[in-house]
Image: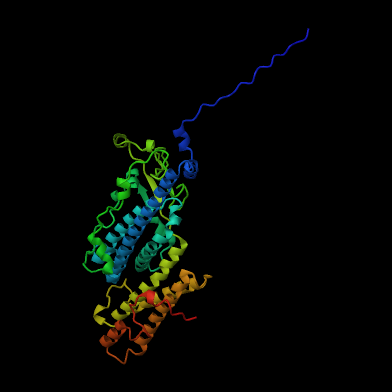
């Protein structure tokens, strides 16, 4: 009798079906777009419209904030030029009106950068980098000038980035007006001293903008869970994001990638402590070098003004810790020569933005050298008061005034 082996039928393993909402959560933004396109022409154009509108609104927010950063950074520079040399000593810095104004403007600029950093997360940093590059350069110019006046040397790049680390709450991400309102910044158009300049650009402080800065975020209807966000995934590091601390309760929350069912309700959000995240706004090497190139023009103005003070004996400093005006000018001149030697070591093309500013750097250095030469050589020909007026008016600078705009000097190349 033969043994009959009964084969057991193969069992069909059926995995539990994943809910559509759960499957949607695991998809990237590109997958969501690809899965939804082609179903309906009207729906496709609705997706494209949302993407374009979000892109243009974000770009407009960045440009407005960058314009404000540029304006306040200029006022920071003006405040530094108004400060006296003794104001930078520790015992006098707390009572100096010019430095107090500088610190107030600096705090406002950091809030504006905090607001911009929310829109520059992930790949958006490189997408909108050109829109914020000018603001970075002006801010770097102001901070490096302050660092030189206090420490007498160049501010390193990591010291700049140390101020651009922002602790952010989900409420601030969803409503950046909690950080600062664009066009309604404190200090308005008038600084503490009433001067400060800023040109006609300061008219924006009257706040003629009737539309709130983030009106598109406040009035926009809540999108369904399968709505298509714009600009792709935001997990790439450029306005890099990291947890504020190592605790498990800390989470990275971004409104760009948050599903509607993940958004906590108001009572639930109030009951639990809001997690915070750190947003690090990076400074590119190009912006850092361009900011230093702009710094040379401000150092030239500082040297000319200091040289004029050396012709006024009543303004000679009696404090032994403060260098004489002549020594301060010599230090600025040597500092500019060191910067120029550093830039000369770079391999640049003629179309590089840095190479275009090298002519201005050389011209600033030449103006200081001509001014020092003429004061020493022709100092015996004129009374000090007359020589000082000639110095301020630019008659002893070897051609060209001492306070002209650097943008008009970029066409002169000595090579």
Q: Residue lying furthest top in this view?
A: 1
The residue closer to the viewer here, 253 or 346, is 253
**Residue extending farthest bottom:** 381
Q: Is residue 116 left or right of residue 344?
A: left
* For residue 94, above or below residue 24: below
Q: Residue at x 24, y 61 (%)?
A: 205
Say above or below: 291 vs 386.
Answer: above
* Residue at the spot 34% in from the left edge and 53% down from the top edge: 115
> How many numbered marks, from 0 up?
0
- The type of colouring in the image is rainbow
Residue 242 in sight here: no
The picture places residue 324, in percent across and down from the top left corner, at: 32, 77
Location of residue 304 (image quadrant):
bottom left
Q: Is residue 26 visible?
A: yes
Q: Position of residue 315 (x, y in %)?
A: 25, 78
Which corner quadrant of the image does residue 297 belong to? bottom left
When the figure is inspected, residue 315 is found, relative to residue 396, above or below; the finding is above
Closer-to-camera residue (377/113): 113
Q: Position of residue 121 (x, y in %)?
A: 42, 51
Q: Nearer the viewer, residue 362 or 183?
A: 183
- 218 displayed left or right of 56: left
In this picture, is 333 found above or below 53? below
Q: Which quarter of the image is occupied by the N terminus?
A: top right
Q: Residue furthest front?
A: 41
Toward the right, the furthest residue is 1
């Amino acid at each position: 009798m033969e043994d009959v082996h009964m084969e057991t039928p193969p069992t069909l393993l059926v995995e539990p079906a994943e809910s559509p909402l759960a499957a949607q959560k695991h998809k990237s933004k590109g997958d969501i777009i690809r899965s939804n396109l082609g179903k309906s022409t009207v729906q496709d154009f609705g997706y494209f419209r949302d993407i374009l509108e979000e892109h243009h609104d974000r770009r407009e927010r960045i440009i407005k904030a960058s314009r404000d950063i540029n304006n306040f950074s200029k006022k920071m520079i003006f405040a530094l030029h108004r400060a006296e040399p003794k104001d930078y000593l520790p015992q006098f810095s707390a009572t100096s009106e010019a430095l107090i104004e500088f610190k107030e403007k600096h705090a406002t600029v950091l809030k504006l950068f905090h607001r911009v950093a929310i829109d520059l997360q992930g790949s958006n940093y490189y997408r909108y980098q050109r829109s914020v590059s000018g603001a970075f350069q002006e801010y770097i110019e102001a901070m490096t000038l302050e660092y030189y006046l206090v420490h007498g040397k160049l501010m390193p790049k990591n010291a700049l980035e140390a101020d651009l680390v922002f602790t952010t709450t989900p409420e601030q991400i969803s409503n950046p007006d909690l950080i600062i309102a664009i066009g309604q910044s404190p200090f308005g158009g008038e600084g503490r001293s009433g001067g400060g300049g800023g040109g006609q650009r300061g008219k924006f402080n009257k706040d003629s903008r009737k539309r709130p800065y983030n009106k598109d975020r406040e009035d926009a209807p809540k999108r369904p869970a399968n709505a298509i966000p714009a600009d792709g995934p935001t997990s790439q590091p450029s306005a890099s994001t990291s947890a504020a601390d190592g605790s498990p309760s800390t989470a990275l929350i971004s409104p760009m990638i948050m599903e509607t069912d993940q958004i906590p309700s108001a009572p639930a959000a109030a009951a639990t402590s809001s997690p915070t995240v750190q947003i690090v706004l990076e400074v590119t090497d190009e912006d850092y070098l361009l900011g230093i190139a702009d710094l040379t023009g401000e150092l030239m103005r500082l040297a000319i003004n200091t040289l004029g003070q050396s012709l006024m004996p009543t303004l000679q400093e009696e404090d032994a810790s403060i260098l004489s005006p002549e020594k301060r000018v010599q230090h600025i001149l040597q500092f500019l020569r060191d910067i120029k030697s550093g830039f000369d070591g770079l391999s640049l093309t003629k179309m590089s933005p840095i190479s275009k500013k090298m002519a201005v750097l050389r011209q600033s250095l030449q103006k200081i050298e001509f001014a020092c030469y003429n004061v020493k050589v022709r100092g015996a020909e004129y009374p000090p008061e007359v020589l000082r007026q000639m110095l301020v008016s630019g008659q002893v600078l070897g051609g060209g005034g001492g306070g002209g705009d650097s943008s008009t000097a970029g066409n002169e190349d000595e090579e």
